[in-house]
Amino acid sequence: MSTATVEDLTLFGLLSRSWELDAGVVDVVFDRSGDAVAFALADGSVALAALADAEPATARIRMSVEHGQASIQPRAKALPPIARLHAGQQAPAAIAAHRDSGFVLAEASGALVRVDADGTRGILSSDLDGPITDIDVAPETGRLACIATGGKVAVMAAGDDRPAPLPQDGLARRLGFSPCGTRLAVARDGAVTIWSMEDAPRRVADLPAAERAHAMAWSPDGTLLACGHGSGIEAWRMDNGGTVSLPDYPSPVRSIVWSADGTAMVTSGAFRIIAWPRDRLATNGAPPATLDTGRPSLAAIDAVAAHPAKPLVAAGYENGMLAIAELGKPDELPIKTEGQGAISTLTWSGDGRFLALGTDRGLAAIVELPPQMLK
């Protein structure tokens, strides 16, 4: 039996499986089947972990007969090492969840590779010039889009093996499909282009943008697109062409998510969770009041993630703290104290049982959240 350390006995240590890697984590993705999670690293490699746990937190909960209180016991065995996949490129790895299960990984050569939960690889396409800097896959249609060398955008329909280029003015920086997969947003310096993906790709709008996009998020109904940048947010309404500007953030907005019911847009970039109520976002006038969520901090939030079913938001801070708060409520549940680098990426599993996170100093972690904690 291994000896529990002080760190193992913290709430984070008791709930999480964590690994210290030799490169910063730039993205984290759960596969759609719920079998695995992939951590994209700054050195171009990917760390792959199975979601199944030999000693889950739910199996280590003990109820005190004397006091009637629950506690979580530490692990009895050391964690196995995390698997590493080397894509070969000397640039941050680009990954996305595949349509049904597994992941899409870009290799240095420009090949798009399907990676299963067990690490098995299969070539999807080898017709692009590497490195590839961004990938998205529309789950409803299976269509894939990516940004390749020179900021060129290519799209590939499900079942195809040859991506088709999109004519793009300037270097593409980020891209993302709408929830239904019928539109693709491509951000470049100074503008965001909207493409219709029904039948043949068709350019339908060019939206002027003040700054380079750090983050991009469609509302669940696909009627509003938000982009975070160095000093705030710009958002565009697809139904009426209106523009929403939310400026004056104290730090860059690198993360934007929507609540499960689509009623609130939640962002990083401030010293507390910023949640904008959807029904109060206007196309002119002063920005609306936000929903007071969580507690103010001396550290800025770098990453946010919305629970897939409950009105809960997880926030990762620049000092390494992690907390969960309910939208519109001031209380929050601290999960991790500061340290081990800034939380650079954060996401929930599809069933809401797990949080996966990565830091810029190479901490990769999967946090299991027992149902008792999320009532």
Image (cartoon, rainbow, N blue to C red):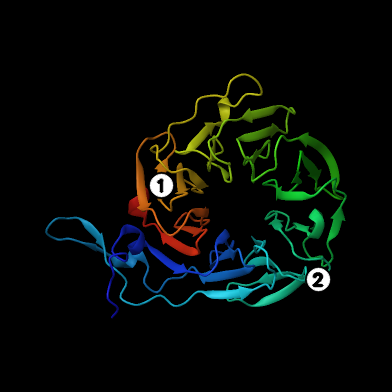
Total numbered labels: 2
Q: Is residue 375 visible?
A: no
Q: Amino acid at mark 2?
A: Ser
Q: What residue sits right under mark 1 in the picture?
A: 324
Residue at image position (58%, 41%) is 253
Q: Are marks 1 and 2 in contact (CB under 8 Å)?
A: no
- Label 2 Cα neighbours within 10 Å, binned few <14 / some 14-19 / many ≥20: some
Query: Which numbered disc covers residue 126?
Result: 2
Rendering coords of residue 65 (x, y %): 14, 61
Q: Is residue 218 visible?
A: yes
Q: Position of residue 220 (x, y in %)?
A: 62, 42
Horizontal side of 251 relative to 315 (left or right) equals right
Q: Residue at x 40, y 42 (%)?
A: 325
Q: Residue at x 71, y 27 (%)?
A: 242
Give the secondary structure at mark 2.
loop
Three-letter amino acid code of the residue under disc 1: Ile
Q: Quadrant of residue 241?
A: top right
Q: Residue at x 77, y 35 (%)?
A: 207
Residue 345: percent from left, percent from top: 54, 54
Instruction: Give whichever of discs 1 and 2 has the lower sequence position.
Output: 2
Say which mark, if any, is on residue 172.
none
Q: Residue furthest top?
A: 285
Q: Is residue 279 left or right of residue 152?
A: left
